[in-house]
Image (cartoon, helix red, strand yellow):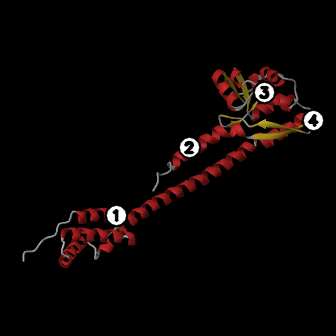
Amino acid sequence: MGQKEKPVSALISQIEENAERGYTMTHTVQIQVNQQPQLLSVKDFSGKRVVTLKDIDDLHCRPEGTASRNFRTNKDKFIPGEDYWHLQNDQAVDFATTNFVGSNPSKTRELILLTESGYLMLVKSFTDELAWKVQRQLVNSYFRAQVNRRESLQALMAATHNLLASQEIITERLDDVEQKLETQITLDSGQQRRLQKTINQRVCALEQIKEARGEWFRQLHKEIKDRWNVSSYKDVLKHDLRDVMNYVAAWVPIRREE
């Protein structure tokens, strides 16, 4: 058998890690803004769906800096870790680079990330018709969709866990079957001919007189049957063939005195 697969626990951990990192890089949500589709890249931080202040300005068609100004004006009303996160320096660069935030992510020095509750608090003052439509879409298609995706991911992980567990059981059973085959299967016809040929060559090399070879054949066959506990050389097990061949090649008969 080939090399065994990774343990199930290791594969599940890898799936979880990839899901945590990779989903934010490739998934987008389409939001209708003034009857025009606008793509919003999905961003997760610390297990929660988040948006940036720039996302809010773009989706609500507000002048650049509007969301930032409103947030800083009312920052004391927002709870860190519940309504928002303030990323700085390397943490901000890492997030911006991973999630393609801004035109030059490597130059990002700080980022404000708003959760669903933080977003809804911030846009309270946005009462125009567009604001209501965008809010509804973001809540239903962006923030709440995270719950459905998490449930789908958990179901996928459970199914993967079961599949991999079954695979490991099958692999173990195949190993057992292979081991049993190696210890129970006898020689095939080709291997039988090889062994018989080796026996013939050994006896003929020891006895030049053809009429006298019968005794050596009987003696050698008997020793093979006794030593390997078989009723015939044809019943030798496959995994014993090499040992039998070596034994025959070095065999010396017991010569009885006349």
Q: Any mark on residue 239, and which?
A: 1
Please identify the quadrant where the C terminus is shown.
Answer: bottom left
Local crowd size for mark 3, using a 10 Å CA cut-off: few (<14), some (14–19), many (≥20): many
Judge the density around disc 4: few (<14), some (14-19), many (≥20) Cα neighbours within 10 Å: few
Q: Which residue is mark 4?
A: 129
Element under disc 4: helix
Whether residue 188 is visible, yes or no, is no
Q: Quadrant of residue 102?
A: top right
| Label 1 Cα neighbours within 10 Å, binned few <14 / some 14-19 / many ≥20 | some
List x then y, in percent, for residue 252.
17, 66
Q: Are marks 3 and 4 in contact (CB under 8 Å)?
A: no
Query: Height in image: 230 above or below 18?
Result: below
Mark 2, residue position: 13
Q: In front: mark 4 or mark 1?
A: 1
**At label 2, which amino acid type do we have?**
Ser
Q: Earlier in the sequence, mark 3 or mark 1?
A: 3
Q: Secondary structure at mark 1?
A: helix
Indicate the amino acid at tag 1.
His
Distance in Å between CA atoms under marks 4 and 1: 82 Å
Sequence order check, earlier mark of 4 and 1: 4
Residues under labels 4 and 2: Cα distance? Answer: 45 Å
